[in-house]
Amino acid sequence: MTDHSDEGTLFRSRKFTDWPTVKEALIAEEIGGVFILAPMAMQLVADGIPIKVVYLGHRDGTAIIVGKDSGINEFTQLAGKTVAIPSRYANQNILMHKSMREHGMPFDSIELRELPPPEHPTALQAGTIDGYIVGEPFAAKAEVDGFGKVLYHTKDIWPDFISCVLVVREDLIAERRELIQELVDGIAKSGKWLDEDMEHRMDAAEVSAKHYYFQDPELLKYVLSKPADRVKYTNLAPLKPDFDEIMELAAEIGVLSRRVEFEEYADPSFVPDLDQIDWNMDRLPEEGSKP
Amino acid sequence: MKRKVLIGALAWAILLTLAHIQLNIGWSQLKDNADVIMGKKRRELTVGFLPVT
């Protein structure tokens, strides 16, 4: 494992716990970019923060979870129940509203409660909520621990679901374009590598559990393999029709303070051709090597 | 006369370059870029993440 690209650029990661701090860090130019929720990126642009969505973090990788013995087997049975969402600015919130509309249910028929994702499984187990919708690995946690079951994977109700997107500062796009390209290429290469072989996914689970997620590697292995298309790391171009659908719904339910056009908040020009990129293992620097 | 024009043009070019660095690039950015080119340090980019999904 190395912390820099094969071009030698050092990419650092920084964990945030709340939205205002992300906003401040972007304004203060402490970070070049950030992985955030898609509707959140739109709202930041609506607030005048000069950023652009340049790539996606993944596709799918979210599930609606209910109690194993709850007797809930279809979406309409959630009427009158309390379901946790990660944030009002999460696409998971948009999906719940989209599903309610598709099933002819009023938007207030399910009580949606904002909860930090790590608290979703414990709240379900404690009985303070009836279900939750969240990204992995917190969806799988209840399943693996034996008290929850998947009601729906997003891949089955909103195929190619978008959750996290990569946004970068517009000044970097203008002045250090090659750096952003290098970052996007690296993410695209990693995604391609992950999706081409299950063994790669298992290796990635070990590394990310230890160094980034601080989770049980077995949980991450489960997420990346049960089923194999539970979360996908290819097809990560930000596409206008996908984002328009999210934006329209988000504006309609009042998540966005105003409508924002795709061109205002997205720049798909960095999306690489996956056939043209690959890791050149011979060129990867050794861990701890000098520039 | 020719020499004076040459020196004047050179001084003007230097002045414009310095003004460009001051106004558009920034001296610390220039130093960082120079260090990267000289191999003294790596280019860096910090990317944040918000684990809410």
Image: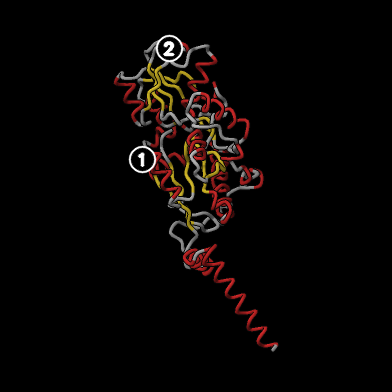
Q: Is residue A285 visible?
A: yes
Q: Amino acid at mark 1?
A: Phe
The residue under label 1 is A214
Residue at the (47%, 44%) spot, across then down: A34
Query: On the rendered structure, is A14 left or right of A170?
Result: left
> In the depicted view, which residue is nearer to us: A89 or A9?
A89
Q: Chain of mark 1?
A: A
Q: Position of residue A111 (x, y in %)?
A: 39, 18
Q: From the top left corner, tell me how far across and down residue A57 is, in percent.
A: 51, 39
Question: Vertical placement of A48 versus A140: above or below?
Answer: below
What is the residue that sits farthest to the left in this orientation? A126
Dot 1: what SS? loop
User: For residue A223, what is the image quadrant?
Assistant: top left
- Residue placed at 43% from the left, 59% from the top? A288
Checking the image for residue A79, the label placed there is: 2
Question: Label 1 crowding class (10 Å Cα cut-off): few <14, some 14-19, many 20+?
Answer: few
Give me the disc on residue A243: none
Could you tell me which residue is drawn at 38 percent across and 20 percent down?
A148
Q: Secondary structure at mark 2?
A: loop
Residue A168 coordinates in the image, percent (x, y)? 52, 46
Label 2 crowd (10 A; few <14 / some 14-19 / many >=20): some
The tally of labels here is 2
